[in-house]
């Protein structure tokens, strides 16, 4: 990974306990902020703020938008990376990341199914 911004985002996320919990929670199954909050016992405002940051930095994607029974929109988010390895050597940080191909496949299926 060569992008300085992407490296900084990954390092920031890995250094934050709540962000790691969020990433772990949506690695295999997309979830809403409310579901993440309940499962990981993170306060709602913290979950919302950190999920938004992860979305803005490209570490999460919205995989589905549901309409709740009371008519509100609920976005389901999923992590774009399956694993991350960080290496530091003499003022050089290298990061290797494995993409979460399940997410990429689902997004592509949705995109190409639009007619």
Image (cartoon, rainbow, N blue to C red):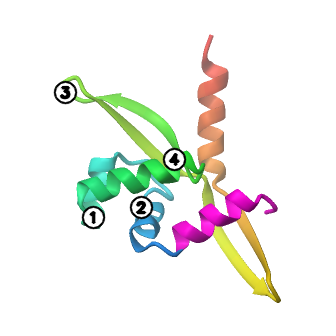
Marking on residue 69: 3
Which label's residue is closer to the chain start, 1 or 2? 2
Q: Kindly report the distance in space between the C-alpha atoms of the residues bearing marks 3 and 2.
A: 25 Å
Q: Nearer the viewer, mark 3 or mark 2?
A: 2
Which label's residue is closer to the chain start, 1 or 3? 1
Circles 1 and 2, Cβ within 8 Å, touching? The answer is: yes
Residue where numbered disc 1 is placed: 42
Q: The residue tagged with tag 3: helix, strand or loop?
A: loop
Residue where numbered disc 4 is placed: 55
Look at the image and say whether residue 56 sits in the magenta stretch. Answer: no
Crowdedness near tag 1: few (<14), some (14–19) or many (≥20) residues, C-alpha within 10 Å: some
Q: Which residues are magenta?
A: 1-14
Residue where numbered disc 2 is placed: 22
Which label's residue is closer to the chain start, 1 or 4? 1
Q: Nearer the viewer, mark 4 or mark 2?
A: 4
Q: The residue tagged with tag 2: helix, strand or loop?
A: helix
Circles 1 and 4, Cβ within 8 Å, touching? The answer is: no
């Amino acid at each position: 990974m060569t992008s300085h911004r992407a490296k900084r985002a990954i390092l920031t996320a890995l250094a934050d306990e709540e962000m790691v919990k969020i990433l772990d929670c949506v690695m295999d199954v997309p979830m809403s902020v409310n579901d993440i909050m309940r499962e990981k016992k993170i306060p709602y405002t913290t979950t919302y703020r950190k999920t938004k940051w992860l979305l803005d930095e490209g570490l999460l994607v919205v995989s589905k938008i549901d309409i709740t029974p009371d008519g509100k929109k609920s976005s389901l988010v999923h992590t774009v990376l399956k694993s991350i390895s960080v290496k530091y050597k003499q003022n050089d940080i290298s990061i290797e990341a494995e993409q979460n191909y399940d997410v990429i496949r689902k997004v592509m299926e949705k995109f190409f199914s639009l007619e």
